[in-house]
Amino acid sequence: MHQDVLSSRVQSYDGIPAWLYDQFPAPAHAYPWPLQSAPPVGDWFFGYELINEPWAGNYIANPFLLLPGIAGSTNLQPLYDKLAKAIRSVDDKTLIFYEPVTWGVRLNGKYFGTGFTHVPGGDSYRDRSVLSYHYYCIVLSLDPVPGNGTIPTFERVLCDDIEGPAVFESVRVDLLRLGGSAFLTEFGGCDDSPTCDEQLRWALEAADEFYQSWAYWGVVRNQKTTINRLARVYARAMAGKPVFSIGKLDQKRFIELFKQFYPEGNPKKFCKYAFDTFDADNDGTISFEEFLITYSAARNGNLDDRLDLVFDIYDISKDGLIDEAELTKMIVALYKLAGKTNLKGDHDPKRRAAQIIAKLDLSGDKKLSKAEFFSGCKSDPFMRRLLDPNS
């Protein structure tokens, strides 16, 4: 039975008759008696979650409890402090997860936020406290989309551009104020459908962006398929300040990442063509595996590796040949990537592209094959330094 339908005796509503609850015998031991002699230890035990999806309390007697901040400060925080004190008397190290009412993580403030002013047990337990929260888009809960359909634009905007970001931002603001960490302990609630894929993709990318751990909730019918949907690349350890963590890169983040390695240049043009080339399934993202190939060739490969990558990127027509227009775009992008601003005279990209093609177009078709392209770049001192700084 879910905890929020137990009894009005504990400021919930009656999932069992009150007369039956009144006949329950008093417990023989105070909480947490199962832990008195041997608190849980080992990798299998992660933490104590005090209550899952707590209810606000008796809102008939006190309608203000429907305000999440009032419910949190009036009922939940005193209860959590009491539970934390009992737990910490026998286990002072393990994480404690504490959760506001489910509608308490869309906004912040005294009335519309979580209502918490400190982590359970007080500020000295910040390093062992985790704010637990759930995310299910309210619009899709009220008006479900058939599993074989796609989420309409209006609902997608409400979920992905308004409510979802509000949840993660609200949690972020609360963490700055309360301290401790946070954990998306429930999301999903759907399985094996295009609609589900849309919901999972957004939630997973948002969790990556905000560095949030997460736990999926759902009835898994196809375990392998679900695992593939949820699988993410993550860093087991980080040194320094993380820039971002993402399982898949969209074009904006792809450009931001390259800026870290080319601070003096402008990688926008180069990244645009690189992104289009490596987004093999045209879903608007680059998987981690695809990114590794790009990054390795661009940063760690030898000259031939880099030239092969550049050729594939700027062969826009994908016909195995580069014409003068494509070569001009390539040179401009590489100049910008390197931070070169003087594009006049001998460095004029169009002039240089025409010269390279005129010099190396052995077939006379005014286009370069991959072999001709390799030869031309290797014979150009500046292009060689640009593509192979160690030469």
Image: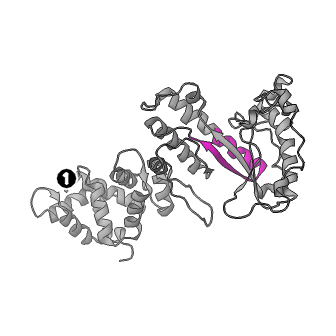
- Residue 242, image quadrant: bottom right
x and y, in percent, of residue 34 in the image: 82, 55
Using the image, determine if residue 196 lies above or below residue 274. Answer: above
Residue at (44, 37) in percent of width and height? 193
- Magenta includes 176? yes
Left or right: 183 in relation to 149: right
**Residue most toward the bottom?**
391
Whether residue 342 can be seen here: no
Using the image, determine if residue 41 lies above or below residue 317. Answer: below
**Residue most toward the left?**
364
Q: Nearer the viewer, residue 129 or 302?
A: 129
Which quarter of the figure is the C terminus placed in?
bottom left
x and y, in percent, of residue 197 in the image: 47, 40
Q: Which residue is mark 1?
A: 319
Left or right: 351 in relation to 103: left
Q: Nearer the viewer, residue 327 or 79?
A: 79
Span highlighted in magenta in the image: 167-188
Which quarter of the figure is the N terminus placed in?
top right
Whether residue 61 can be seen here: yes
x and y, in percent, of residue 327 in the image: 25, 56
- Name the element at disc 1: loop
- Magenta includes 349? no
Residue at (70, 64) in percent of width and height? 42
Q: Nearer the viewer, residue 85 or 251?
A: 85
Left or right: 266 in relation to 371: right
x and y, in percent, of residue 131 in the image: 72, 47
Residue at (86, 50) in percent of width and height? 31
Using the image, determine if residue 291 lies above or below residue 217. Answer: below
Identified by mark 1, the residue type is Asp
- Residue 361, image quadrant: bottom left
Left or right: 352 in relation to 183: left
Q: Nearer the viewer, residue 297 or 30?
A: 30
